[in-house]
Amino acid sequence: MNKGKVFLVGAGPGDPKLITLRGLETIKMADCIVYDRLASPRLLQHAKPDVELIYCGKLPDRHTLTQEEINQVLVDKALEGKTVCRLKGGDPSIFGRVGEEAEELVKHDIQFEIVPGITSGIAAPAYAGIPVTHRDFNSSLAIVTGHERPEKTESSINWEKLATAVGTIIFYMGVGNLAFIRDQLIQNGRDPKTPVALIRWGTMVEQETLVGTLEDIVEKREASGLTNPAIIVVGEVVSLREKLQWFEKKPLFGKRVLVTRARSQASELSERIAELGGEPYEFPLVRMETPRELAALDTALQQLSLYDWVMFTSPNGVKFFFKRLRELGVDIRTMRGKLAAVGPKTAAALEEKGLTVNVLPGEFRAECLLESVRDELKAGERVLLPRADIARETLPRELQTLGLDVTEVDTYDTVIDAQNVDETIALFEDKMIHMITFTSSSTVKNFVQAIQGQGRDLATLLDGVQVACIGPITADTARELGLTVHILAKDATIQGLVDALTVE
């Protein structure tokens, strides 16, 4: 029997970018991923398309799978010859029961590897502006479970020594026992004035920090309603938060932003949202494909030398144009006409091919391209427009009005792609999406089609959600389909859209 291998992986504290490189490698290679609720679901986007996903998340009042069942799943999948990634929130060796899982694998002679992760007890305070050690305050740190029940006859925690032995004490998942923890620390000598912080969902957009002292933190927590999952930090270092907090100051902190671009294009927008403290959630609604009908495109490419102008309106048009050019074996040097481009991204895509763009309008719309090039056009010139199958007719119609011979060809087809629509709808229903970004009319149309196709009412689902559009054409489409546009970029670029998101 060819046994597989199990990787016991720390997923980090919540922010998916805080996973280690090795941890990410194991996700990408895994045939089966067994994950819990504290591991960011965005990490699963890096998995293979055919990966088997098994959810084993635990809540304080219920377990999807018991620990014994999880152990057995790891054994069973490895015995099937699969590479298994056991994805745990934080670090697997800190209250992650990795020892029990590893022991079970040893019992069955199954290879395993433990991949450490950033633990929430260190990361959550750091994101709240609280370094857990500081030479002006402390030189020792304790990490303690907060799960112990007050009614236990014997505690595994030596409260008498713990209370005053270390400068900073970190309690995991102890909010439900906060009063008991406070009493034990004060009764065993800790100063009631000692600063305390509770940090819920640390490193996430939902991060919430409550600061007090041992003597008043219980009352403050009850008034705030703060619940698990949360870290409790006890120590003088908590006083540094007022000076050092940084994460909550980012302009998009607390915002989860729906990114509706094609999967191949979403990364740039998502990266910029994350840098500004928001959490991008990708719901790709558009997929670009090679045209179903290639005859017109192929004819135009084989007659490139006949065109006086070639006008590109998107980077995708450039990408698929040159892809087909290579497939046909057509020499790029046969393209002798002038080049025009809508927008700097389109121009940059052409320049990467070693080409010089003759006309680049100041605004990033087809109408503006026409105004920029109008004085250089001559009646009777031949113009090639390589575009999407759903492109608007404004530009070719106006060019024809000026007496030009216009050839439109579809360089790519745009199709709807809404694979994770159920998951996205669930996020809307739970009020976990705060903004939506639309970067083209097709993303708006596909969004509406995908949501209404599931029988959901748009107005109800989007109540309280801000809609942001990259430009006036996209905004007009959104309004025509019944959406209220709250944010409109001044420049129809990704940076322009990001800038608009951060304007209060």
Image (spheres, rainbow, N blue to C red):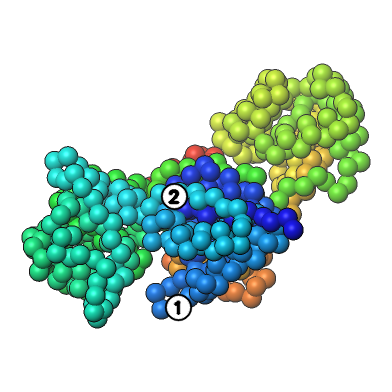
User: Horizontal placement of 134 versus 77: left or right?
Assistant: left
The residue positioned 36% from the left and 47% from the top of the image is 251
Which residue bears the numbered disc 1? 62
Amino acid type at image mark 1: Arg
- Percent x, y of residue 54: 60, 66
Instruction: Decide which of 83, 48 is in the foreground and name it.
Output: 83
* Above or below, comparing residue 343 to residue 161 in the picture: above
Amino acid type at image mark 2: Gly
- Write down the quadrant of residue 233 in the picture: bottom left
Q: Is residue 485 visible?
A: no
* Above or below, comparing residue 37 to residue 474 in the picture: below
User: Horizontal placement of 483 versus 263: left or right?
Assistant: left
Q: Label 1 vs label 2: CA separation? A: 25 Å
Q: Is residue 293 visible?
A: yes
User: Horizontal placement of 447 versus 139: left or right?
Assistant: right
Instruction: Decide which of 17, 246 is in the foreground and name it.
Output: 17
- The quarter of the picture where the N terminus appears is bottom right
The residue positioned 61% from the left and 62% from the top of the image is 108
Which residue bears the numbered disc 2? 117
Which sits earlier in the primary sequence, circle 1 or circle 2? 1
Instruction: Decide which of 320, 467 is in the foreground and name it.
Output: 320
User: Horizontal placement of 299 versus 285: left or right?
Assistant: right
The residue positioned 61% from the left and 58% from the top of the image is 109
* Above or below, comparing residue 67 to residue 474 in the picture: below
